[in-house]
Image (cartoon, grey):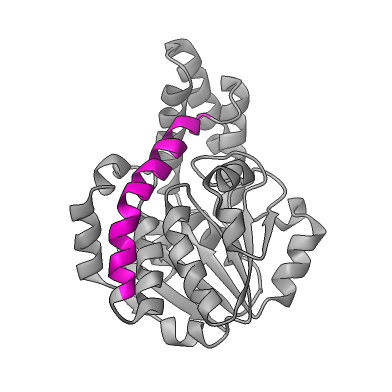
Amino acid sequence: MKIHPRCAPCLLSRVQFEAELSTKDIELQKKAVLVGIEVLRRYLADGAPATHLSTRIHREAYRVLGDIDPYREKKQQSNEAAMRLLPFAVDFVSEKDSFRRAILVSIIGNSFDFGVLGFDADKATAREAMQKQIEHGLDVDDSDKIRSILDNVVYLADNCGEIVFDTLLFEEIKKQRGRITLVVRGAPILNDVTLKELLDLGIDKKVDRVLTTGSNAIGVCLKEAPPELVEALRGASLIISKGMANYETMSEYDFRPIAYLLKTKCESVAEAMGLQKNMNVARLEE
């Protein structure tokens, strides 16, 4: 996905958000925002992939703040909120049509996203909000096609909180005798799940293998990825790409088949996918 001018205020809002998470020093917060503005001035170019800019802007903000993980507390809060809701999600998935329902729940989990402009993850953790999303259902539903190619799945994880609900989909893949290679970020960036949070939650035990992206780049940057990840992507019977950031990067590559599971929380991603904002999407591209 290419960068759109409307991405600029969203990126700056994230920088402001993480600066406030990191420090109460107003002058340091200003410096982080100013370095974000400078990155936008230099690199907001037509035709550039969106995640190239977002990776650069957050790396510069973290450098100025002197903080490698401003979201550490928010990530823990998100995981805790998801764990409180997990029994409700388990009951929903177990009633019937469990594979499709597990996909829906994992997409609803994608709503746990701190710092997105106009989105309040604290309110989105309520059971009532989850029930509303369940009733809304899938707007794009390729779940039957996805279910048919689960032999060797590479699963690109996204956010903390969300990863808790992904475990229900892991269980469904296992029921189909599928093998799962789970991929997490190689270092902290935003509220994305890293190996640390994965191990803390014990989710590594629910999959066959865990790999990382090799860096804190937004999404998957092949130039920074370890060789075993590239090999896994090439050999997968299916890549499952969770969330908008993974879509923004993976849509720039030619790996197929790939299933995008996400909620279109921003207009730019929705537009790139030919969809509307706030849709629950399970799209397979072959």
Q: Is residue 170 left or right of residue 91?
A: right
As drawn, 212 above or below 149? above
Q: Nearer the viewer, residue 182 or 21?
A: 182
Position of the C terminus, as image quadrant, is: bottom right
Between 211 and 85, the one lying in front of the other is 85
User: Residue at horizontal 46%, vertical 38%?
Assistant: 75
Q: Locate residue 50, reporting x and y percent.
A: 54, 53
Q: Is residue 231 above or below residue 192?
A: below
> Residue at the location (28% across, 59% down)?
88
Q: Main secondary structure of the magenta part?
A: helix
Residue drawn at (18%, 54%), measured in percent from left and top?
A: 128
Is residue 1 visible to the viewer in this orientation of the structure?
Answer: no
Q: Is residue 59 above or below residue 209?
A: above
> Is residue 61 located in the magenta-colored stretch of the structure?
no
Q: Is residue 107 visible?
A: yes
| Residue 87 is inside the magenta segment | yes
* Residue 172 in the image: above or below residue 190: below
User: Residue 268's x, y, as percent?
Assistant: 41, 58
Comparing 200 with 78, the one in front is 200
Q: Which residues are magenta?
A: 70-94
The residue located at (56%, 31%) in the rendering is: 69
Q: Give coordinates of residue 115: x percent, y percent.
A: 39, 39
